[in-house]
Image: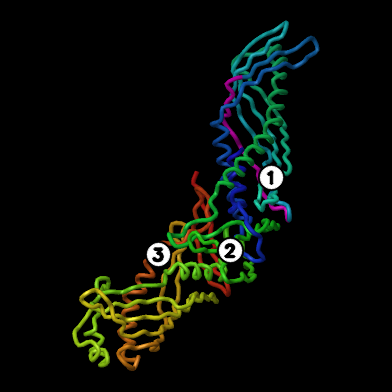
Amino acid sequence: MRKMVKICCSLLLLSLLSGQLSANPGLKVRITQKGLEYAKEVGLEILKQNIEKEHFPDLTGYEKFGLGNVKYNISRIRVTAVEFPSASISLIPGTGIKLVIGNASLTIDMNWNIRTWMFKDSRRSTVYISKVVVTAIFSTPLDNTGHTLISLTSCRITSGNIDIKLNGKSGFLHNFFIKYLKKPIHRSLVTNSCPNIRSGIQLIDEDLRSLNVLMPVDHLAEVDYSLNRLPAVFRPFIDLDLKGIVYPAGNYSSPPYVAPPFTIPDQRDSMLYLAFSEYFFQTSSFAYYTAGAFNITIAEETCSYFNISTEIFGSIIPEVAKYSVTPYPVMLKLMATDIPIISLEQDSFTAEIQGSMEAFAVLPDSTTQSLFTMNIAANTSIALNIFDQKLMGSLCLNRLQFSLAHSNVGFFEISLLENILSYILQTEVIPSANAKLSKGFPLPSLANITLTRPHITIAQGYMLISTDVHYKH
């Protein structure tokens, strides 16, 4: 029972720890009825497997009958078959989840012995328990520290028929006294089922408290997927608001942005929806800008396609040829001068990058002389895909603008350099950025659960992942 409850509730509790409550999330997660139905089916199958593997304690005691007591001992209890022909999982708006298992049945093999003042015997028997109904309601309150909990609000177990079939021949006395075994079997089923469910809930809490909701992206950044507020339960779905903030590694100061409100469209075809707001990606841009990830140096030894030198620049710009008569290798230092601006519009994900590029002549003694500095404005598009539970990106350069910021070789027309600089950016900078983006961004995840057939949609102000899930037991 613990495993089933854990699967059904795990989809609800994608994140446990909650810090400071904020007005708007950077990430919204929606779990649909389809998702809960899948959790139910997986959970019931796991429950069946676990019940059939479980070792049950012996039952020993007394039952009264008219002429005295019946002493019984039931041992070597083993469940050989479990059936759940009817089960449902539903959402109670504002409360939580209701799980109902109806008309369940169990087949049990057991050893028994009974003893009275007039009769004693022991046998191996088969017990058929039918019309078992389990009704459990779970809620998700927050405690005074801001942690969300999973709580068993109510639990009720009823069992209908218990039929005991004796192995071998039986007489009148066997059939008369065997009915006294039904009461302890029924009592054990009703008494122990709800406490076992409650114990399973406590294990869920322990597991979820150990979840690391502050996940490393790489050595430069971390992402916070902690829950922002109490889960909102509606009849057709559950909505979770997660912080969805990317920080520079080890630096958890609030980013200089305010998360705007946004809503997920009413879609129910997939089990799970994850909506990342523009705010989420902007905090990512801020984190990497703060960490210096947009600063790149291109030198002779790192240039993949040709060796850049004062001779090459001098063949294009006479001022460089006059300034540096002796050909020297050239080093280019690129840096972002402001935080790249992320924009999400319908079917469009763009990043506007303002930067500078300074060209240096590398002298024989390894010192450098600055030749000129240029301002760069780049407009890029980002294509997204999902692989191995990670969000991956690919950068495409749309537009470049150059302007001369400073020159030690004298004024020259910037248009003379545009082609070669564009080529360097396309062949050196963009591939380097895409290599980093291809490492992927970790998505919120639970153990043994993978996304299946994920689909990405870019909308005004957010990116939506629509996906089913698969649980591997």
Query: Which of the marked residues, 2 or 1, is nearer the chain's N terminus?
Result: 2
Q: For the residue carrying disc 2, how many other residues have a C-alpha within 10 Å: few (<14), some (14-19), or many (20+)?
A: many
Residue found at x 52% / y 69%: 281
The front one of 322 and 214 is 322
Visible in this render: residue 453? no
Q: Closer to the camera, 437 or 458?
A: 437
Q: What amino acid does circle 1 point to?
A: Ser
Which circle marks residue 417 in the picture? none
Mark 1 secondary-structure assignment: strand
Marked residue nearer the N-terminal end (1 or 3):
1
Q: Mark 1 points at which residue?
A: 151
Residue with the mark numbered 2: 27
Image marks 2 and 1: residues in contact by CB distance under 8 Å: no
Q: Which amino acid does label 3 sit on?
A: Ser
- State the mark number for residue 438: 3
Q: Is residue 89 magenta?
A: yes
* In the depicted structure, whether residue 256 falls above or below residue 87: below
